[in-house]
Image: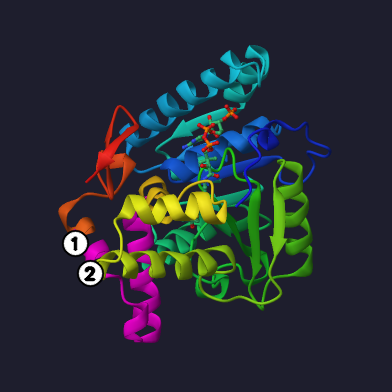
Amino acid sequence: MAADPGAAESPPADRDVFPSVLVIGAGTMGAQIAMVVALSGRTVCVTDIAADALDRARAELDSRMRARVDKGRLTQEQLDDAFARLTTTTDLAAAASDVDLVIEAVVERLEAKRALFAELDSLCPTATVFASNSSSFMPSQMADARPDRFINLHFFNPALVMRCVEVIRAPSTAQQTVDAAVAFVRDIGKEPVLLDKEIPGFIANRILNAVRDEAVSLMENGVASVSQIDLACRTALGYPMGPFELMDLTGIDIGYLIKKARFEATGDPADAPARSMSELVAAGHLGRKTGRGWYMYENGEKVGEA
Ligand code: 3HC
């Protein structure tokens, strides 16, 4: 997938679409999505049930964005302005009371998302549009509260860098909501990729999953090590990183939960999470964020195969 590290810093053309945004969930995705929105000139609030998750998100954004200033990609003033527009709170009710768009980026569990949108329906103004950053669940599975004002906006990791945002409408989504979402995505410096009909996993993750399944199968069958499979993908196929390196970046638990959800929906054994992935998740080796996944990491740097 092509990366455009400068995209998030493009000047906005029109800030009228969704000038005030609420991001729910201060994980890697939520934090970086919020910063992209703040850089576009909008006000953005990030909420999480855990105050320490908010502190971690702020600290991570701070060091990542400071590096951008040091590299001359952003002025200190632009960064200060963006941080001045970005607030954090654990008080969902207060944060939801006056926003134009909610972007949900919580754990990839359908019931958690559905419960959250039901609660938001009673907290947000009636005009507020609800969006989910789900990796796999279709909008129609979450849209009950606001059928015409619900859409999926699927960002990619790392959200500060990756240009694509998949825009997925439910059959009930109003055209006005789709048009506003597409304009918003363009205006925050990303490339909207519009699906004509919903399908679990959308476009990019379905293609990625096929590649990942083959990579894991080659490894489990003893054909080659994870580093050699990654090397082939980088040097033969021009991937910026191999499938195992990418799983470590996005979180092995994320890919595992996506496969688990698909398996639960289809019952097809081919959709079940691979044995080696299940073992890593059970052992808590989730990738870069835990210091160990398919590879080992020290101070954020890869130091060898696990
Ligand atoms: N967070 C934010 N920014 C990051 C980052 C991270 N984790 N990792 C790297 N970057 C930034 C760097 O700071 C650098 O910015 P700069 O140009 O301003 O200096 C820029 O990205 C390039 O980084 P590097 O030079 O260190 O390294 P690379 O050139 O290898 O790029 C990469 C890193 C952008 C992550 C690249 O390897 C890449 O594109 N990898 C593939 C990512 C991908 O496929 N993502 C999709 C995953 S699937 C998904 O997200 C779906 C979801 O549902 C699970």
Within-10-Å neighbours for mark 1: few <14, some 14–19, many 20+ = few
Could you say where residue 198 lies in the image, as x and y percent from the top left?
A: 61, 75
Callout 2 secondary element: helix
Q: Magenta segment, which residues?
A: 251-279
Give me the residue at 45% from left, 55% from top: 232
In the depicted structure, whether residue 276 falls above or below residue 96: below
Mark 1 touches mark 2? (CB < 8 Å): yes
Within-10-Å neighbours for mark 2: few <14, some 14–19, many 20+ = few
Residue that mark 1 sits on: 279
Give me the residue at 70% from left, 60% from top: 193
Which residue occupies the extreme right position in the image? 13
Could you say where residue 297 lies in the image, as x and y percent from the top left?
A: 28, 35
Asked if disc 1 is less than 8 Å from ligand 1, the answer is: no
Where residue 171 sits, quadrant-wise, is bottom right
In depth, the one of 75 and 161 nearer the eye is: 161
Asked if disc 2 is less than 8 Å from ligand 1, the answer is: no
Could you say where residue 209 lies in the image, as x and y percent from the top left?
A: 46, 67
Residue that mark 2 sits on: 275
Query: Which amino acid lies under the numbered mark 1 shown in the image of this protein?
Result: Glu
Query: Which amino acid lies under the numbered mark 2 shown in the image of this protein?
Result: Arg
Q: Is residue 33 visible?
A: yes
Distance, label 1 to label 2, CA atoms, is 6 Å
Could you say where residue 57 lies in the image, as x and y percent from the top left?
A: 42, 32
In depth, the one of 87 and 41 nearer the eye is: 41
Predominant SS of the magenta segment: helix
